[in-house]
Amino acid sequence: MKRLHISPEEKAHLEMLHAQKENGKERDRIKAILLRSEGWTVPMISQALRLHQSTIIRHLDEYRGGKFKLASGGSESHLNEEVTAELIQHLEANTYHHVHEIIQYVQATFGIEYTVPGMNKWLHRNKFSYKKPKGHPHKADVQLQQEFIEEYRRLKEQVSQEEPILFIDSVHPTQATKITYGWIRTGQEKQVHTTASRTRVNLIGAIQLGHIAEAISAEYDTINGESIVDFMKQIRNQYGTSKRIHLILDKAGYHRSQLVADKAKEMNLSLHFLPPYSPNLNPIERLWKVMNEKIRNNRFFKSAKDFKDAIREFFSIILPNIGGALDGRINDNFQLLKT
């Protein structure tokens, strides 16, 4: 079979298609053409791609005869570069739940029709995937967050190793089944029993970075100034009676009450407050996420007792065993929440 001659423009186009295609068979077809144009023989290409020689010859004949087609479904011929850039910008600013909604937008805006498989391929080729967006408070103040980070770094440099820095927060997990993503075999559905029970546990927790396994936690009927004071006593008991302890916490009303301020001074606890709407600056928030992953996600609790026992098991058994492996996940590599 004679050598295949293609122009530099054709070769550049095929190279671009090869980089964009996700289907392995389509990439092999393109490679066969490129390799033949570079002087490779059919047996050499067959051996390199692990394809039968007749398959290689068919790909080459189709290309020579103008019948070489790749599954497009949103190919470059539908949208030019300018329209593609405009659509990408629109999809980055707007989140659609269904592909057909994107198809309707493209039809109404650009007058171009797509099928659902075609639009799916276009989305994947342009680096879009179907996933949940991450929420963050719309009132987050970047400047205040940056100022806190600088103050926190100064605090770390100034305090001695005998003065631990703890992050405190409260959380209120409920017995209601928490359905979330998980790996399920393709083509099958997986059902999880659910309950809408509003039974909840009011938890206060504290962690010292680098010592996650030693996290302190306590349950309360309600979270208020009195429960915060009781929890501070538990912290003081665990860390001894002399060393100064620095507590970083949010500006919830009970944290800023006069009762808490007076008792903190009495127990030699220094309070440092996070800026408003900044859960991203409190690493213990990541611990709550780990707790959900280990004991709550996609798990049904028959009774309030089972639910509460699972919470207690996390802090008494699970966390002490995995805490040492969480330092890379629960740390002070803060990210700013931008409005």
Image (spheres, rainbow, N blue to C red):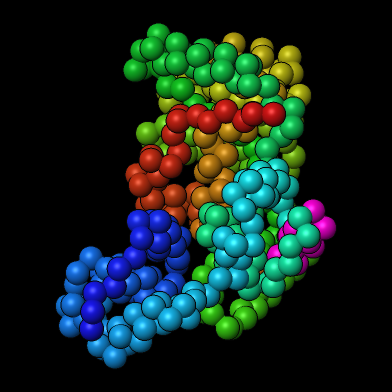
Magenta span: predominant SS is: helix
Residue 139 % position (x, y): 74, 27
| 107 inside magenta stretch | yes
Q: Which residue is painted at 67% across and 49% down in the image?
A: 83
Identify the image quadrant of residue 113. Answer: bottom right
Query: Residue extending furthest top?
Result: 158
Q: Which residues are magenta?
A: 98-109
Query: How many numbered circles are shown?
Result: 0
46 versus 332 height, above or below: below
Q: In this view of the protein, which residue sits in the foreground, 257 or 133?
A: 133
- Vertical arrangement, residue 115 with respect to residue 142, above or below: below
- Left or right, 161 with respect to 332, comes to left
Out of 1 and 194, give the one closest to the viewer.
Answer: 1
Residue 98 seen in this snapshot: no
104 vs 6, left or right, is: right
Q: Position of residue 147 (x, y in %)?
A: 57, 13
Residue 311, horizontal then vertical, whole percent: 58, 54
Across and down, in percent, residue 332 comes to 46, 29
